[in-house]
Image: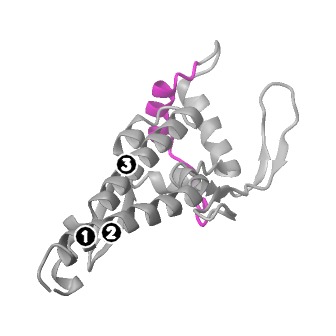
Amino acid sequence: MSARGWIQRKTYKNLEDYLNSYGKYIVRQARKTITRKTKGSGQLKDSLKYKLNFKKQDFSVEFNSNKYGEFVEKGVEGVGGLVSKGGSEAPTAVAGFRTYITIDGKRRRSPYKFKGSRPPITSLIPWMTTAGITIKAGQTIEGVAHAISWGIFRRGTPGISFYTQPISATKRLFNKKLKENFARDIEVGLMTHAFGSKI
């Protein structure tokens, strides 16, 4: 009996179970990171999902989010310039550089950057309400939204690496467990189909 005759997806039960548990773990960690590092990102957090694929006798784990997630993951660089801190303090110069962590644990500059236009206040105002930003006496929500918009445009937004950081942090353990579960499945397959069947 050839190996091809019994190597199917169900052959890799231990490996599949481990990859499913790993996918769930990474999504949990990503949601915790979003909760800790952002405000008002409930839709992004709810959109996080993983998908386990099996094709040509090979597994792959795919991590997904809504289209906004890629910018939160890797950040968006600002155009730089002077940013006011409010009050009587003099504006400070910012470069607008933003970075993120790769799955190899290396820091890279964001591939995204604000260019011709700043974030519209029509998008910021609902976010401000969700994030619990208070409007002080003498201020208007539109005025505060404009100030935030200019700040984001010049500073950029930080990349929080909600997927890549936990993947990087667990890479060594993941590879170890991957080999262990793969070997266990091969051993079970050989014992069941090779020694337990007529050859």
- The location of residue 134, given as percent across then percent down, is 58, 18
- The location of residue 191, given as percent across then percent down, is 25, 70
Residue 170 position (above or below residue 192): above
Query: Judging from the image, what secondary structure is the residue with disc 2 in?
Result: helix
Q: Is residue 133 left or right of residue 48?
A: right
- The location of residue 160, given as percent across then percent down, is 60, 48
Q: Is residue 135 left or right of residue 96?
A: left
Amino acid beneath label 1:
Met
Location of mark 2 (residue): 187
Residue beneath the point at 51% across and 39% down: 34
Location of mark 3 (residue): 21
Of labels 3 and 2, earlier in sequence is 3
Q: Which residues are magenta?
A: 111-134
Of labels 1 and 3, earlier in sequence is 3
Reply yes or no: does residue 131 show up in magenta. Answer: yes
The image quarter containing residue 7 is: bottom left
Residue beneath the point at 15% across and 86% down: 199
Query: Judging from the image, what secondary structure is the residue with disc 1 in?
Result: helix
Relative depth, front residue between 77 and 171: 171
Relative depth, front residue between 159 and 9: 9
Structure colour scheme: one colour
Look at the numbered discs 1 and 3 and tell me whether their residues touch, using CB distance below 8 Å: no
Query: Judging from the image, what secondary structure is the residue with disc 3 in?
Result: helix
Q: Is residue 63 left or right of residue 136?
A: left
Q: Is residue 6 left or right of residue 82?
A: left
